[in-house]
Each structure stands twice: as C-alpha cells, then as structure tokens.
C-alpha cells in the first residue's frame, strides 16, 4: 500500500529532513584530507541527538552507525571507520533522522581536496539527474517517469545507473512503498498521487552498472571499482511541481 500523507505529517517529515540537511552541513565542515570517517559519524550522532532526534539508520536492520559513508568505488551503505579521507577522494554521506515519529533521509557526495575533472563532472551530473527526476515527480505522472528522466540524462554522458538499489517512499518508516528506481520507462509503474512522500536517490556509476556487496554484509561497490556518486532528496508529490522537503542549502553554504 502506498501511503498518502496529511499536511501535518508532511510538516513532520520536513522537520526531520531539514535536520538531516543541517547534519550534513556539519559533516561538510569537517571533510578534508586526513579526517577519519568514524569522527564524522560520531559528530553527526551527537548533533542529531542534541537536536531532539535519533539517528534514523542506527539499528535499522542492524546497521551499526549514524551515517552511511561510501568512498570512491563504494556506492552506498559503507561503514564509517578509521580510514582517513585522502586528497582526490569522493565520499557519499547518507544520513537519516527520526524525529517526532517521522524519518528524514538525504545524501550528498562530497569532494575531498582536489578531485579530477572527470569525477567532478560525475558529481555535478548526478546531482543534476536528481533534479531532472524531481521535475517528473508530479501528480498524475508515474514512478517510471522519474527513473526515465534520471537514466536518460546520465546515460547521455556514458554513465550507468545502479539497478540493485533504488529510492523509496518515506514517512513513519524509513523505507515505504513505492520503490523508486533510477531507471525506467515513461508511463510505467505506480501512479504518483498528491501527498505521497518519496526519497529520490540516483546512484550513478562512471563505469559499469554492476555492483557487488562487500563481505561486511552492507557496503556496495562498483564491480569495476570505478567511482560512483549519490545524491538524495525527500520530496512530496504536488500538482505541477514537487516540493522538496530536504535541503542542500546548508551544505552548499559551507562548501561555497
Ligand atoms: Mg539515504
Ligand atoms: Mg534513502
């Protein structure tokens, strides 16, 4: 069953999503060569709890951390660790919060130090693909219209779309129906109805689309070990234009 949210529920998801955006901005302040990713995780957990929420991922299906931190060829669900970020790395930081019973879920891929032009473009275009998808996330369209827009845009650059991992509905649960693939056909899939809340999260690979899971049982990486980028927003379906509930504004204030 696909849930349609009331305006009160949407406001609660917005509050939770905004806290995710603020948490990711705090992460952005610390990202530089030499920092270990466990330090980012510990800071994020403290920040979230200090703001009256709980880390949304910690304990979810047994996930042991506040952040999913995925470096370079790692796609998503990476574990924070003692590993230090290095100049030229890219790092996807995915964060969830649970506040007043509702989840927020957003991700941003950061550059560490000086990144190659090829990889910088992968990040810019993956973020742009997210907005192309959001443009299609309107009442009366179908889920496949979102995936088609993302896929059509990124494949034009020779990139590939991860198939094994997808976006999702969001609310009282971190993952609700429908699944929101980042690939698809126009006019296919469940119909989008006003008040549905979706987490749209393209995972785009520089090389092949195939991913494999590491022996930790969580981390996904690209099969060819080429880099992958990931950006995620929470949106509510409206007539004519989706409303974005999460934000990159705080992050980009730090970065610029
Ligand atoms: Mg996420
Ligand atoms: Mg998500």
Image: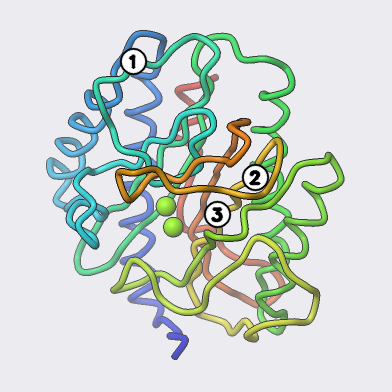
Residue at mark 1 = 84
Q: Position of residue 42 (x, y in %)?
A: 18, 31
Question: Which structural element holds mark 3?
Answer: loop
- Residues 39 and 52: in front is 39
**Which residue is found at the position 17% from the left and 56% from the top?**
59
38 lies left or right of 94: left
Residue at mark 2 = 204
Within 10 Å of the Cα at label 2, are there few (<14), some (14-19), or many (20+) other Cα atoms?
A: many
Sooner in the amino-acid sequence: mark 3 or mark 1: 1
Marks 1 and 2 close (CB-CB < 8 Å): no
- Residues 8 and 210: in front is 210
Where is 231 relative to 190, above or below? above
Between circles 3 and 1, the one closer to the viewer is 1
Task: Name the quarter where the N terminus is drawn.
Answer: bottom left
**Which residue is found at the position 48% from the left and 46% from the top?**
247
Where is 254 relative to 244, above or below? above
Question: Which structural element holds mark 2?
Answer: strand
Q: Is mark 3 within 8 Å of ligand 2?
A: yes
Q: Where, by quadrant of the figure, is residue 242 drawn?
A: bottom right
Q: Position of residue 66 (x, y in %)?
A: 24, 43
**Which residue is found at the position 66% from the left and 41% from the top?**
205
Task: Using the image, tell me which numbered label, if any, was put on residue 249.
Answer: none
Residue at mark 3 = 201
Q: Mark 2 and mark 3: span between their CA atoms?
A: 10 Å
Between circles 2 and 3, the one closer to the viewer is 2
Where is 209 relative to 186, above or below? above
Question: Looking at this rendering, what residue extends furthest in the right direction?
Answer: 156
Sooner in the amino-acid sequence: mark 1 or mark 2: 1
Question: Which structural element holds mark 1?
Answer: loop
Question: Looking at this rendering, what residue extends furthest in the bottom direction?
Answer: 1
């Amino acid at each position: 069953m696909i849930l349609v949210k009331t305006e009160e529920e949407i406001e609660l998801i917005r509050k939770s999503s905004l806290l995710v955006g603020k948490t990711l901005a705090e992460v952005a302040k610390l990202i530089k060569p030499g920092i270990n990713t466990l330090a980012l995780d510990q800071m994020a957990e403290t920040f979230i709890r200090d703001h009256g929420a709980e880390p949304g991922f910690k304990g979810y299906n047994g996930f042991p951390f506040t952040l999913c931190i995925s470096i370079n060829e790692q796609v998503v669900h990476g574990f924070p660790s003692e590993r230090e970020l290095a100049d030229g790395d890219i790092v996807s930081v995915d964060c969830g919060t649970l506040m007043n019973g509702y989840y927020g879920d957003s991700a941003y891929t950061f550059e560490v130090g000086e990144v190659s032009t090829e990889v910088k473009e992968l990040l810019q275009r993956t973020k742009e693909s997210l907005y192309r998808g959001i443009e299609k996330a309107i009442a009366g369209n179908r889920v496949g219209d979102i995936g088609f827009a993302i896929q059509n845009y990124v494949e034009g650059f020779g990139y590939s779309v991860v198939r094994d991992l997808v976006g999702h509905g969001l609310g009282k649960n971190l993952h609700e129906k429908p699944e929101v693939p980042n690939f698809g056909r126009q006019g296919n899939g469940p119909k989008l109805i006003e008040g549905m809340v979706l987490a749209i999260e393209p995972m785009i690979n520089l090389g092949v689309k195939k991913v494999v899971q590491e022996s930790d049982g969580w981390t996904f990486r690209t099969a060819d070990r080429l880099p992958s980028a990931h950006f995620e927003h929470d949106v509510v379906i409206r007539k004519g234009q989706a409303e974005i509930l999460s934000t990159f504004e705080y992050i980009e204030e730090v970065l610029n």
